[in-house]
Amino acid sequence: MANTIIVAGYGPGISKAVAEKFGSEGFAVAAVARNPDKLAAAVAELTGKGIRAQSFPADVGDPKAVRDLVKAVRDNLGPVDVLHWNAVASGGSDLTAPDDDGLRRLYDVAIVGFAAAVQAALPDLRANRGAVLVTNGGLALLDDKVDAVGVAINAMGLAMINAAKHKAVRLLAQKLRADGVFVGEVMVTKTVKGTAFDTGTAELDARTVATKFWELYKGRRDLSLVV
């Protein structure tokens, strides 16, 4: 049976490139996002490229839904070898302005849902010496200039959550290393071409990021790679 990767937060940028990269290496792809129609189109495209893929619509900010989707992936595609967490929410752009729901949603997707996915997939990851791979952003860096950018572009909540994800990666790496489970992140510091954030000046090709994830997975040494 082929290895299986869950790609949570599937969209037209990094997650698609990761699915295509791992799929080209023989992985079955479980594509996860909230919109079933977009997922169906994505799976059709992957299938057309000779990749075994299936869609799993779910709200990854809901821990019960996340646990259910991991079970569904296991039942339909087999044990989980790689969990790729690419999911992100919007909200909490200005920490001095009230946005309780936005901040809560950011945390639910980036931390609560992520933790639920790791917990649900952990028996498989341990048995297969698998990997947890996280997409993160450069706003996570603890640097005055980076913080100034986060304030200037009205992305304070995102910066805060990215920092939390960065810490989660390091903690999980420590916790799971003895079990043979690799945990790492690619920290993206530039705008990715073809995404919603691309205003025509994006510099980074999503395939470059996907290659970095493959290097993380195969090398199993670096906790963070920066692009």
Image (cartoon, rainbow, N blue to C red):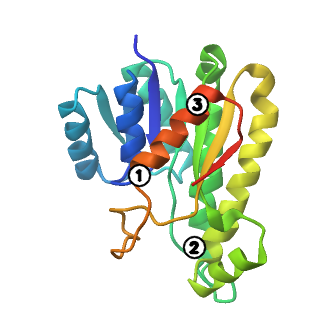
In the picture of the structure, the residue carrying the numbered disc 2 is: 101
Viewer-closest of 45 and 92? 45
| Neighbours of disc 3 within 10 Å: few (<14), some (14-19), many (20+) | many
Residue 227, compared with residue 26, is above or below; it is: below
Tell me where residue 19 sits by quadrant: top left
Q: Quadrant of the C terminus?
A: bottom right
N-terminal of the pair, mark 2 or mark 3, is 2
Tell me where residue 50 sits by quadrant: top left
Kindly indicate whether the residue at mark 1 contacts the one at mark 2 (C-beta within 8 angstroms): no
N-terminal of the pair, mark 1 or mark 3, is 1
Residue 32, compared with residue 201, is above or below; it is: above
| Neighbours of disc 2 within 10 Å: few (<14), some (14-19), many (20+) | few
Which residue corresponds to the image point at 44% horizontal and 59% vertical from the top-left? 204
In the picture of the structure, the residue carrying the numbered disc 3 is: 217
Q: Quadrant of the N terminus?
A: top left
Left or right: where does residue 198 sit relative to residue 101?
Answer: left
Which residue corresponds to the image point at 43% horizontal and 61% vertical from the top-left? 192
N-terminal of the pair, mark 2 or mark 1, is 2
x%, y% of residue 63? 57, 46
Q: Secondary structure at mark 3?
A: helix
Separation (CA) of disc 2 from disc 1:
30 Å
Q: Is residue 86 at least partly visible in the picture?
A: yes
Viewer-closest of 22 and 207? 207
x%, y% of residue 225? 64, 47
- Please state which amino acid type lies under the numbered disc 1: Ala
x%, y% of residue 213? 53, 39
In the picture of the structure, the residue carrying the numbered disc 1 is: 206
Q: Secondary structure at mark 1?
A: helix
Separation (CA) of disc 2 from disc 3:
35 Å
